[in-house]
Image (cartoon, rainbow, N blue to C red):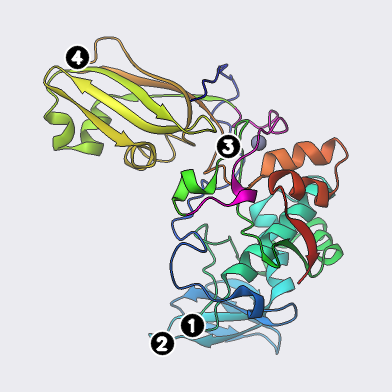
Amino acid sequence: MRRRTFVTSSLAFAAVGLSVRSRAAFAGQSGDEFDPASATARGQALRVLLGRGDARAIDGSTFWFRGRRYRGTFSYAAGGQVVSVVPLEQYLYSVVPREMPPSWPFAALAAQAIAARTYVLQRSNPRREYDVVPSEADQVYTGIDAENPAATSAVDRTAGAVLRFDGGFAQAVYSSCCGGHTESSADAWGGAPLSYLGGVICPYCTASPWYRWSRSFRARRLRAAFGAKIAALGPLQSISIAERDASGRARYVDIAGADGSFRSEGSAFRLAVGPRILPSLLLGSIAFAGDPAQAGARVEIEGGGLGHGVGLCQWGARGMAVAGATADTILNFYFPGTHVGDD
Ligand SMILES: [Zn+2]
């Protein structure tokens, strides 16, 4: 068990527009994966499930859907949902600037482009009606108006480059800020440990406004979140981190009262309290402020990072790029044992 020392940052709560990401359907764990080695290749079309609504062709290579312009063509899935059919590289033109600020250095954008390309190739599955959804559940994709010249350049200059591991695609997942130590995929989502997703110490994301944060919420939120399990504890007495994983993230949180105690898995605790209140599970401390049995009691938390923390730390990629690292160096650092190659 590893203890961490936290420093509260006055920069907490500053939003940067990056998503709180939760990979509920972690590729490789869901049981319906297709052999990626023979899946979508560069130049082939990617199928993005846009949802219900009317699509209208603008010309042979762009169309309108819900007030947005998209590259490619469209078809309809069973049930009438619109599926965008778009060349992979053109899809990335929109994804990269939505997943990372396009004002960031080129090497960070290039690492993001390679990760996003690899992620989607790994997810492609001809046996399904579509490959990905356009939201944080996969990657954010909102069409042409999101495109930005710097991000497009990063896509073009890395065209076809993917992250390889052991002859196949690596699972090139990413999140906003790891808070100083990336998370292992096995600790975040279960499944067999992956050597390149075991978690690394990251000294590069300290400039992120999410590197350290503090939160405070009313203790009654626990009752709303956990219901009868909390009511059964009687007057509340304490809340604590019962166990941490190797990265320092909370594996279990214990809540104790006069009549008993309740243990929540860390991930369930974050979901129940709300991911906006708990940006990550890298918690430095958690405690009641004042008498927890009183109505106005609050829970105070200090923590670090934004998102699940597995794989590429985007703020770390920015920090490495600022220090002169290339995209390949960045990806090798966060996915040790992988290499950048052609698709
Ligand atoms: Zn980091």
Which residue lies at the image location 68% right of the left edge and 28% below the top edge? 206
- Compared across the picture, whether 2 is left or right of 301 comes to right
Instruction: From the top left corner, tell me how far across and down residue 53 is, in percent.
Output: 45, 78
Q: Quadrant of residue 230?
A: top left
Mark positioned earlier in the residue sequence (1 or 2)? 2
**Amino acid bearing label 4:** Gln
**Amino acid bearing label 1:** Glu
User: What element does badge 4 sit on?
Assistant: loop
Q: Does 69 appear in magenta?
A: no
Mark positioned earlier in the residue sequence (3 or 4)? 3
Q: CA distance from mark 2 to mark 3?
A: 38 Å
Mark positioned earlier in the residue sequence (2 or 3)? 3
Residue under label 4, please give it: 294
Q: Residues within 10 Å of mark 3 (few under 14, many from 20)?
A: few
Q: Please tell me whether mark 3 or mark 4 is closer to you in this view.
A: 4
Q: Is mark 4 within 8 Å of ligand 1?
A: no
- Compared across the picture, whether 86 is left or right of 212 comes to right
User: What element does badge 2 sit on?
Assistant: loop
Mark positioned earlier in the residue sequence (3 or 1)? 3
Residue under label 2, please give it: 78
Residue under label 3, please give it: 15
Magenta-highlighted residues: 192-211
User: What element does badge 1 sit on?
Assistant: loop
Q: Please tell me whether mark 1 or mark 4 is closer to you in this view.
A: 1
Q: Main secondary structure of the magenta part?
A: loop
Taking 31 as reference, is 148 above or below it?
above
Q: Residues within 10 Å of mark 2 (few under 14, many from 20)?
A: few
Q: Please tell me whether mark 2 or mark 3 is closer to you in this view.
A: 2
Task: Confirm or deny contact between disc 1 and disc 2 (CB under 8 A).
Answer: yes
Check residue 129 in the rendering and tell me which mark sits there, or answer none. Answer: 1
